[in-house]
Image: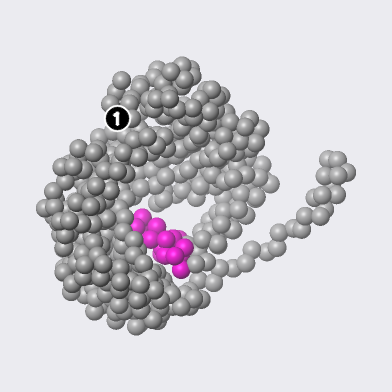
Amino acid sequence: MSAGAVEKSALVPALGPERPVVWPPRTVRRLANGLQVVLVEAHGVPRLAVELIVRSGDAATALSIPGLADIVATTVRTGTARRSRRQIEEDLRRMGGEIGTAAGADSSTVIADGLAESAGPLVELVAEIAREATFPEDEFERERRQAIEGLKLERVTPGFLASERVRHELFGAHPYAVVSPSIPQVEAYKLDELRGFYRRHWAAANSLLIAVGDFSAERMMEHIERAFGPWAAGEVPPFDDPAVEIHRGRRVHVVHLPETTQARVVVANHAITRRHPDWTRLAVGNAIYGGAFHSRLVANIREQKGYTYSPGSQTHSLRRHGWFASQAAVRNEVVAATLTEIFYEMDRMRALPVGAEELDEIQNYLTGVFSLGVATQNGLRGQLATVYLHELPEDYLETYRERVRAVTVEQVLEAARKWMDSANALIVVVGDRAEVEPQAALFGDVVVWDAEGKKL
């Protein structure tokens, strides 16, 4: 080490001891109708955040009516038996709050926040949306038009097209394979289909309510009992969960997006859900490989090679399946070189133990980011939603930093060998076919698709 480097390192103060996270009181209840309730008292600011999670999302009807849960979620807040869209918006302003609705593969959500003094009215409004949405026809048509415009944009967005192809190839005949409906499918939606999904899936026994904020749990339970107690229990709908075929060997797919100068590159393989014992070990390994801004992929592809600004990798978990993916947006001419480096770094993770100092640095990073993430009402609400939607242990958040710290060099190597499946990876490249197909073909036989999902 040079004298200058020694002098510089001497000026960098050592990390202090990790500060404990002070966890606010948590109350977990279940109403007579089956609604699960999680309350956390967080008195730092005079506000509260509320999330209603319906444990049914787009996967529930993906094989019959793709995207139905999504348009139900966007339309559900446009009118109730007691309020129009405009009345809802005006009442929210008086509460100093806002509401958002959305749907993913496994769930549909209503997220609201507002002033603590408006806790009762805010809870009542969320319950009204969950119990009494009317789906006005004019609002439905407006949401349908917006959905179609969104689909048009998706069909020219490389990141979306790559994600869609990855999910389709990984999950095949499983509902998780369907990411988005087509425009004709959205045009064919009927109001009765939206109302039918709402009646069947938006039910108390199929739902979870989380509230975090400046309130007493006892008083908040009174609001919730009054607002949600009359909600019909319903039944938990069955889920079509066919077996997923695990392919062997590398597969290569190109999505043709004409006249693009940049390509989206994704390398993916089947992995695990958050409930798997290896999840934390894989998460630590992923952060070293490509999940942090100072990761190996970033150092290689961004800093050394200059191929892209923001390469990365992620561990994705739905409730029933998971996958691991590396991605980068790069110039057309360096697609093959980028894939080579992605596999080089992946195989290095699988072949050699990470350094003790590198592991310690990533553990500091992960525990620090986690602590920041649970420091706000909405951050804590989001973390709790993950815990209860994925049915994780009650102390999952409280023990997270301890579990990360306990991961060893040997466990990172073992997880990489098991779940960063280089030999059986799926390769997806989105870009101009003439530019990227010859490079993709260096990694295997290529299947080419257009942006509408039709094989060329």
**Residue 385 counted in the magenta span:** yes
Q: Quadrant of residue 98?
A: bottom left
**Quadrant of the image containing the C terminus:** top left
The residue that label 1 is drawn on is 453
Give the residue type that dot 1 points to. Gly
Label 1 secondary element: loop
Please give the name of the residue rendered at 35% of the width and 33% of the height, measured from the top-left corner.
165
Query: Looking at the image, is 354 positioned above or below residue 248?
Result: below
Q: Position of residue 89 (x, y in %)?
A: 30, 68
The range drawn in magenta is: 377-396
20 left or right, relative to 202:
right
Q: Quadrant of residue 214?
A: bottom left
Q: Position of residue 326 (x, y in %)?
A: 49, 36
Along the line of sight, the residue nearer the viewer: 217 or 141: 141
Along the line of sight, the residue nearer the viewer: 157 or 200: 157
**Quadrant of the image containing the N terminus:** top right
**Residue 52 counted in the magenta span:** no
Disc 1 residue crowd, few under 14, some 14–19, many 20+, Cα 10 Å: some
